[in-house]
Amino acid sequence: VQTRPGVNKVRMVLQPRRGVHVVLLDGTTELPWEAGSCSLRATHLASGVTTEGSGGRFELGQSGLHEVHLRLSEEYATVAPQLVQVTDGAVSELVFHLQRKL
């Protein structure tokens, strides 16, 4: 935004916040998100729009039902994708229970 002397008008368009907070559990222990240890992909089922992320909380462009895929480091077994309903103005929590490879 650039302003000049005198009256300046600025128009801001705000979008309602919507997203997912992903919790990783190893047994009963919540794991921290470490850089490069895992990544997320959420697909809006009605439109097919995909959002990528690599942290515990990420914003999504559309409300509705999303399928969330988690890619893990080699230390953990693959987990099945989960469905989460995302609504405008809310952050939904999604818990993945992880199992270490033997």
Image (cartoon, rainbow, N blue to C red):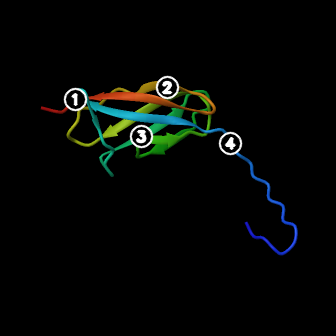
Above or below, 62 against 34 in this view is above
- Per the model, the C-alpha gap separating discs 2 and 1 is 21 Å
Which kind of residue does numbered mark 1 sit on?
Gln
- The x, y position of residue 80, in whole percent, is 35, 26
Task: Answer above or below: position of 4 versus 68.
Answer: below
State the quadrant of the C terminus: top left
Q: Reading the chain from its start, which is encountered first: label 3 or label 1? A: 3
**Image coords of residue 56 (percent x, y):** 41, 41
**Snapshot quadrant of residue 15:** top right
Q: What amino acid type is highlighted by mark number 4?
A: Gln
Using the numbered discs, state the Cα–Cα distance from disc 4 to disc 3 in whole angstroms. 22 Å
The answer to which of 6 and 68 lies nearer the viewer is 6
What residue is pinned by disc 4? 15
Where does label 2 land, which residue?
84
Compare marks 1 and 4 and give the one earlier in the sequence. 4
* Residue annotated with mark 1: 99
Point out residue 87 in the picture as x, y percentages from the top left corner.
60, 28
Q: Is residue 16 left or right of residue 23?
A: right
Q: Give how far apart the Cα atoms at labels 4 and 2 are.
A: 20 Å
